[in-house]
Amino acid sequence: MSIAIAIDGPAGAGKSTIARLAAKELGFIYVDTGALYRAIGLAASRRGFSKESQSDIISMLDMIRVELSFNDKGEQIVLLDGEDVSGLIRTPEISMMASAVSAIPEVRAFLLDLQRDMAHTENVIMDGRDIGTVVLPDAKLKIFLSASPECRARRRYDELIEKGMDVKYEDILSDVIERDYADSHREIAPLKPAEGAVIVDTSGEDLETSVNKLLNIMREHI
Ligand code: DC
């Protein structure tokens, strides 16, 4: 039987970086489920839909194909209708669109089986917002990873600047606060720790410390 580790938490808590490194160390596949919502956000944005165009976004689901694949380095690739959109989904605009589409129940239902199927066939560390609460409630280990909004905004800012994007720290911080509110107050699958989740705060920690902390917790449980 395959082993699943669920990691949930707000944007910028370091989930993806930490989960990717931990997965490599344990020989698990790392699945970033946010990329799926981002791909749908991109599909909606390409069609010129606004965040409020719920019915258009729902009708669009029958016309698009979202898939995850992995390259030979084990890195996740997101395919939208067969096109690799892994880079295109990482902009602040698509972040906001992804948050909006993720509040639509039909979008969540559309992505549910895809996520569950991956966990049934492989040992996975899957990160998202509702992995421990909805997608994999029976995961062997559930972790809720968080950090202060300022710390998370600073990390996201550094990441985007390194990619050569022209962004302001204040804008990123207000995006983080706005997205936190939207993600934790939506009616369906709101962001909250799953029952039995181990809660880990990474504020002020460097990456190595957080990865080691998580690896210790994981090794104790698997
Ligand atoms: O982790 P991320 O920033 O790439 O996620 C993008 C958006 O998708 C985020 O606003 C929350 C949403 N999301 C979700 O609702 N459920 C998940 N399992 C993963 C992401």
Image: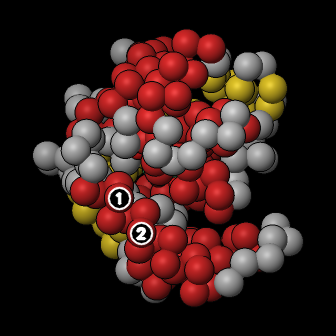
The x and y percentages for residue 167 are: 72, 78
Name, please, the residue furthest toward the left: 195
| Residue 3 left/right relative to 190 | right
Q: Residue at coordinates 54% horizontally, 56% vertically from top-left?
A: 96
- Visible in this render: residue 212? no
Q: Residue 178 carries which label?
A: 2
Choose top left, top right, bottom left or bottom right for residue 157.
Answer: bottom right
Mark 1: amino acid: Ala
Who is closer to the viewer here, 162 or 182?
Answer: 182
The x and y percentages for residue 62 are: 55, 12
Quarter of the image with the N terminus in it:
top left
Up-down relation of residue 170 to residue 178 (above or below): below
Who is closer to the viewer here, 102 or 135?
Answer: 102
Q: Residue at coordinates 27% horizontally, 50% vertically from top-left?
A: 186
Mark 2: amino acid: Glu
Up-down relation of residue 62 to residue 187 (above or below): above
Q: Residue at coordinates 69% horizontally, 47% vertically from top-left?
A: 89
Who is closer to the viewer here, 7 or 73?
Answer: 7
Query: SS of the residue at dot 2?
Result: helix
The x and y percentages for residue 69 are: 69, 24
Few, some or many residues within 10 Å of mark 1 (<14, 14–19, 20+): some
Q: Can you identify the residue that label 1 sits on?
A: 182
Query: SS of the residue at dot 1?
Result: helix
Say if mark 2 contacts mark 1, CB within 8 Å: yes
Few, some or many residues within 10 Å of mark 2 (<14, 14–19, 20+): few
Q: Residue 41 carries which label?
A: none
Disc 1 C-beta below 8 A from ligand 1: yes
